[in-house]
Amino acid sequence: MKQILIVEDEPKLAQLEADYLRASGFASTILSNGLEVEPWLKKNLAELVLLDLMLPGRDGLELCRAIRGFSTIPIIMVTARIEEIDRLLGLELGADDYICKPFSPREMVARVKAVLRRLQPPPEARNEHLLTLDPSRFRMRVEGRETELTAVEFELLQALYRQPGRIFSRQQLMDLIYPDQRIVSDRTIDSHIKKLRKKLTELLPEQEVIHSVYGAGYRYENPD
């Protein structure tokens, strides 16, 4: 069963979310304090985080920023604050979707399924050209052929690969692959992308899967 982390300080709502997720085939863990979230995610596996905005200990926006420093796990923000600035800020920090309170539990389950579905390769990509990643060995594989990546190259490719079509700025990519916040230039990301493209070309000649978006950054598209 896919594990969903529910971060919600209203016990009845958290249990309602867990009950509906369980009825739809998901397992769940509930945390009620924002200070518990980052340590839990660093020790446990989850497929998605349902993250309330207003939390004791540490608020949802701060948590979203912190999680994006070490993980590309999908995040759905749950909030009663619908001001546009909060919605935009949440997305800028890396949230994948929003649910505004009050909401239907069925809508919540549908949003969870939709976000997880977006992270899966589309049916047309599930063919002989499917690119797969092996995090245990920092390798990528296509049609029985594989090549090795450096740790940084793998983290960079994995961040793009998990959210095909999403445009990542250079700063967002730097934050993801350098969680220690070391000082690096934009050109560092460009250099890693160049090396990644060269290795991808070895496995997928005449196909471009990492695209440059002028003035914005980079996005990944599944191979044809």
Image (cartoon, rainbow, N blue to C red):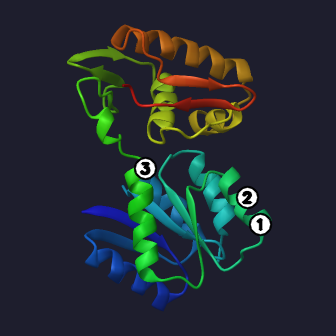
Q: Nearer the viewer, residue 64 or 203?
A: 203
Q: Could you tell me how far apart the alpha carbons at marks 3 and 2 are, in whole angstroms? A: 20 Å
Q: Position of residue 176 (x, y in %)?
A: 59, 39
- Near mark 1 (Cα within 10 A), the count class, few <14, some 14-19 or many ≥20, is few
What is the number of the mark on residue 88? 2
Q: For residue 79, which quarter of the picture?
A: bottom right
Compare marks 3 and 1 and give the one earlier in the sequence: 1
Q: Amino acid at mark 2?
A: Leu
Q: Amino acid at mark 3?
A: Arg
Residue for point 61% across, 37% down: 167
- Near mark 2 (Cα within 10 A), the count class, few <14, some 14-19 or many ≥20, is few
Q: Amino acid at mark 1?
A: Glu
- Near mark 3 (Cα within 10 A), the count class, few <14, some 14-19 or many ≥20, is few
The residue wearing badge 3 is: 118
Q: Is residue 201 above or below residue 130?
A: above
Q: Is residue 77 above or below residue 153?
A: below
